[in-house]
Image: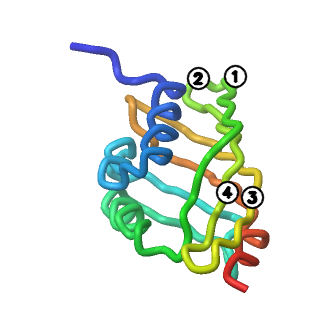
Amino acid sequence: MSQPASPREVAESLSKRFRNRSWAELSELYDENAVVEHPFALPQPMRTEGRAALHERFLSAPTRPFEMSWSAEVIYQTDDPEVVIMQYDSTLTAKEGGKTVTGANLLVIRVRDGRIVHSVDFHNHAAFATLME
């Protein structure tokens, strides 16, 4: 029996699937009862619970009015063996008009048995909201 993926390996896979827009495969990285929090979401913080809900959210990505790209990614190990922190820049480009906004992001990812069980995703939602103005 093989070892489950390490937190770093899971974070690397998460990044790769986002960059490749592998929306249908993203939810495979999450535990059945995973929780993802967006404390800076507007107009209020957002919390998504469960792999099924995350899967539906990921599948809706192509219908959003923008495209997203990632760059300057760094993954940090922490003293907690289950936790990694992913830092990256994302650029959102409006599908209509081509306006772009770039912002810094941090994901605090807890992985257990090769699956994400909890993630707190810090994005600059205020900057991203200007894309739709």
Whether residue 85 is situated above or below residue 37 in the rendered picture: above
10 Å crowding of disc 3: few (<14), some (14-19), many (20+)? some
Q: Are marks 3 and 2 in contact (CB under 8 Å)?
A: no
- Using the image, tell me which numbered label, if any, was put on residue 43: none
The residue type indicated by label 3 comes to: Thr
Q: Which residue is mark 4?
A: 91
Q: CA distance from mark 3 to mark 4?
A: 4 Å
Q: CA distance from mark 1 to mark 3?
A: 30 Å
Tell us which disc is closer to us: 1 or 4: 4
The residue type indicated by label 2 comes to: Pro
Residue sitting at the far bottom: 133
Q: CA distance from mark 3 to mark 2?
A: 31 Å
Q: Which residue is mark 2?
A: 81
User: Which x, y percent locates residue 27?
Assistant: 35, 50
Compared across the picture, whether 101 is left or right of 93 comes to right
Tell us which disc is closer to us: 1 or 3: 3
